């Protein structure tokens, strides 16, 4: 994430397994939190997005750059909370796939790498494909091969899909049919973003579709104010998008069609994760336009504390609060990623992950 991206830029930012049934969140105590249901991992670098590695104890984290600290992909072990760099440090050799990504100029600049939204899908026994929205040096979706049988996972750069000149990428999600992926375009990357207009609901971006042999196209009728996280239905026909400032999740046909609200929320939804049951998990921030000037990208004062995790059944139009926290030491949540029987919550502004047992 570039330095010019403040709170809205950092937050305008997708399928893993949840075991068991979602249950209501823990009751809050007088102190504000029943800590039996939440523990903290300190140390992962600004974990804006998280996703579990299939058949592994590892979780991939997008380490957002800040200050003089460069961006990176990190692995966090769910067994002992060990943290390791996966890329660029400790990475496998680059293996460019020039047939699939003929327009990709080469690997990203490691010193300018700025990861944002993630998606990861298994492509065979012991292997997976990792998609990463990158703002550093170029706006692109970077593609990595992941050796999931290795511990920690071995990550090797594979290629990229450079986004069109004006596109400011945020979330990314693979199409389950293997034909490509979708990414959210939060706002025009060539102009200073008008965050006040975005949070007030003025359309600033849309949804883009990348397919092999075709490249990028705009999903018709997908214009939204600050589109954020994205997930795709099992049949690859519907993109579910976090309409961040409007506090809702919308369904948009990948072939094109007007957005349809599937959930209205009490917070600004960020990244999305699709469960094995076809439901969607999300979390986000309860902030106002005024917070943009004080909280910054979670780095400033007066950031709203706590977070909620919500599970959405888009087919039935039902929404359930899975967990609610008023923890004053953990807020500005950006992602709720299922990890075994837990849900891991990432955030902006601090090097912390919350492990929740709902």
Image (spheres, rainbow, N blue to C red):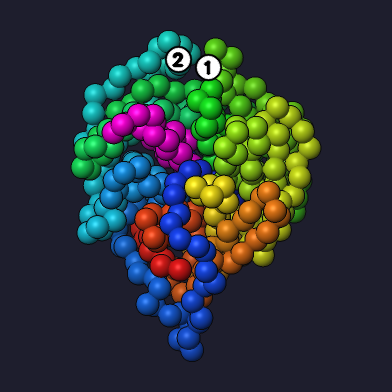
How far apart in space, not on screen, are marks 2 and 1 (Cα)?
6 Å
Q: Residue 251, labelled with which disc?
A: none
Which residue in the structure is indicated by mark 1?
Answer: 212
User: Is 82 situated above or below 210?
Assistant: below
Crowding at dot 1, Cα within 10 Å, few <14 / some 14-19 / many 20+, comes out as some
**Residue 283 spot, x, y in % from top left:** 55, 58
Q: Is residue 287 visible?
A: no
Q: Is residue 227 visible?
A: yes
Q: Is residue 233 above or below residue 47?
A: above
Which residue occupies 26% across, 43% down?
85
Secondary element under disc 1, as helix, strand or loop, is: loop
Task: Please name the residue shown 70% across and 43% down the image.
Answer: 251
Label drawn at residue 100:
2
Which of disc 1 and disc 2 is earlier in sequence? 2
Is the C-beta separation of discs 2 and 1 under 8 Å?
yes
57 horizontally vs 66: left or right: left
- Is 261 a magenta residue? no
Q: In the image, residue 313 lies at what x, y percent? A: 63, 54
Task: Please state the horizontal and vertical placement of residue 200, each as a whole percent of the image.
Answer: 75, 53
- In the rendered image, residue 121 lying in the magenta stretch gets the answer yes
Viewer-side residue, 104 vs 288: 104
The C terminus is located in which quarter? Answer: bottom left
Report the span colored magenta.
113-136
Dominant SS type (magenta): strand
Residue drawn at x 48%, y 56% as measured from the top left: 336
Task: Tell me the element at label 2.
Answer: loop
Q: Residues within 10 Å of mark 2 (few under 14, many from 20)?
A: some
Q: Nearer the viewer, residue 130 or 184?
A: 130
């Amino acid at each position: 994430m570039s330095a010019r991206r403040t709170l809205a830029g950092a937050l305008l930012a997708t399928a893993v397994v949840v075991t068991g049934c979602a249950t209501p969140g823990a009751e809050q105590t007088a102190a504000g939190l029943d800590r039996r249901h939440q523990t903290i991992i300190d140390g992962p670098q600004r974990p804006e997005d998280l996703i579990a590695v299939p058949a592994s104890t590892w979780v991939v984290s997008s380490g957002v750059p800040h200050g003089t600290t460069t961006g990176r992909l990190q692995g966090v072990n769910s067994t002992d909370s060990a943290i390791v760099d996966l890329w660029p440090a400790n990475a496998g050799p680059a293996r460019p796939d020039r047939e699939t990504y003929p327009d990709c100029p080469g690997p990203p600049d490691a010193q300018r790498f700025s990861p944002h939204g993630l998606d990861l899908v298994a492509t065979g026994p012991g292997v997976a494909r990792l998609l990463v929205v990158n703002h550093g040096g170029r706006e692109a979706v970077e593609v990595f091969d992941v050796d999931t049988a290795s511990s920690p996972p071995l990550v090797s750069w594979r290629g990229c899909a450079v986004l069109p000149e004006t596109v400011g990428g945020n979330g990314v999600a693979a199409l389950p049919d293997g034909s490509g992926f979708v990414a959210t375009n939060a706002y025009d990357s060539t102009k200073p973003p008008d965050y006040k207009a975005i949070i007030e609901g003025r359309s600033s971006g849309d949804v883009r579709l990348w397919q092999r042999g075709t490249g990028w196209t705009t999903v018709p009728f997908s214009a939204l104010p600050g589109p954020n996280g994205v997930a795709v239905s099992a049949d690859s026909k519907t993109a579910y998008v976090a309409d961040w400032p409007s506090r809702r999740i919308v369904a948009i046909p990948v072939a094109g069609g007007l957005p349809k609200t599937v959930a209205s929320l009490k917070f600004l939804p960020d990244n999305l994760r699709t469960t094995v049951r076809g439901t969607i998990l999300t979390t986000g921030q309860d902030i106002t336009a005024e917070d943009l000037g004080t909280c910054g990208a979670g780095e400033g004062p007066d950031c709203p504390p706590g977070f909620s995790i919500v599970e959405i059944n888009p087919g039935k139009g039902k929404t359930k609060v899975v967990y609610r926290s008023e923890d004053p030491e953990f807020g500005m949540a950006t992602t709720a990623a299922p990890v075994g029987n837990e849900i891991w919550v990432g955030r902006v502004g601090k090097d912390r992950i919350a492990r929740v047992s709902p």
